[in-house]
Image: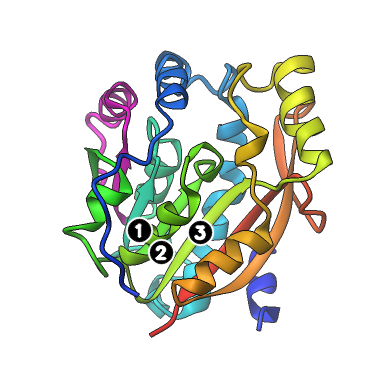
Amino acid sequence: MLRNFYKSANLRVLSTHTRNVNETDVNHLSNLADEWWNKNGEMKALHAINQLRVPLIRDGLISTGIVKTENINKSNVLDGIKILEVGCGAGILTESLAKLKANVVGIDPSEKLLETAKNHMQNKKFKINYICTTVEEHSENHRENYDAVIASEVLEHVPNQKSFLKECVNCLKPGGSIFVTTLNKTQASWLGGIIAAEYILNLVPKGTHDFDKFISPSEVSKILDEFNCTTILVHGFRYEFWRNVAKWQKYDGINYALHAIKNS
């Protein structure tokens, strides 16, 4: 399905040493470390959206021509692709990308979540390097180093979203891709993403989201445009909690995914 979307979709700035991290959110998520890999627990929605995130990234990279032709329909489709996942948590998406043979670096400011991630990948032959750091710190020595940068379910937890996106782009090679999934800033996202999800249906732990940090796809695109990136895809998705399944949809007023490419 995503391949059809892509077929139809026609600065370097010095970083600072300021820690662009919401420590309250980091502590909140760190406290859920033991739940992270429980597919039927408090993080089950995060596992469900992997049904969408993995093909989004795979097909998006195929669409840019970076994937070797002979690998497109194989299990090692992302072989040789260097990916940075920013805010990787305990590695749900990270491991899924590594299974496709991508060379993945996962960074997160939570030592506890990264310890869980490292423990979970023990005895697995994955190309994953987990580092406890922020993207601002990481970009200083890894500029134009990655074929793709992923910020999935992270942007809504970042104090300075423009600085965050700037440093994500700084890590990208020219022609590289940035993938974002997050929550739109609408009345529907407040009702669905906070009131319903946290307080009525208990889909995610209470206090997970702050509506002030929700951001529209047009605002993300505008910021990325400032840093020489062109948005090629914005698409909505939904989580059907009664089936524990994630689905693509045209409506992007609550959850959405965005793919942009750094211009050469």
Q: Position of residue 53 (x, y in %)?
A: 56, 50
Task: State which quarter of the image contains the N terminus.
Answer: bottom right
Which residue position is annotated with label 3? 179
Task: State which quarter of the image contains the C terminus.
Answer: bottom left
**SS at mark 3 in the image:** strand
Instruction: Kindly indicate the quadrant of the structure image that contains residue 132.
Output: top left
Could you tell whether 154 is left or right of 252 in the image?
left
The amino acid on which the numbered mark 1 sits, given as a three-letter code, is: Glu
Q: Nearer the viewer, mark 1 or mark 2?
A: 1
Q: Earlier in the sequence, mark 3 or mark 2?
A: 2
Q: Residue at x 26, y 24 (%)?
A: 115
Query: Rounded to the nearest whole Å, what is the CA distance between mark 3 and mark 2?
Result: 18 Å
Asked whether residue 76 appears in the rendered view, the answer is: no
Q: Residues within 10 Å of mark 3 (few under 14, many from 20)?
A: many
Q: Residues within 10 Å of mark 2 (few under 14, many from 20)?
A: many
Q: Position of residue 148 (x, y in %)?
A: 39, 63
Could you tell whether 198 is left or right of 62 in the image?
right
Q: Is residue 119 above or below residue 158?
A: above
Q: Is residue 13 above or below residue 192?
A: below
Q: Residue at x 34, y 58 (%)?
A: 83
Q: Nearer the viewer, mark 3 or mark 2?
A: 3
Which residue position is annotated with label 2? 77
Please provide the residue range marked out in magenta: 103-126
Question: Nearest the camera: 50 or 24?
Answer: 24
Which residue position is annotated with label 1? 167
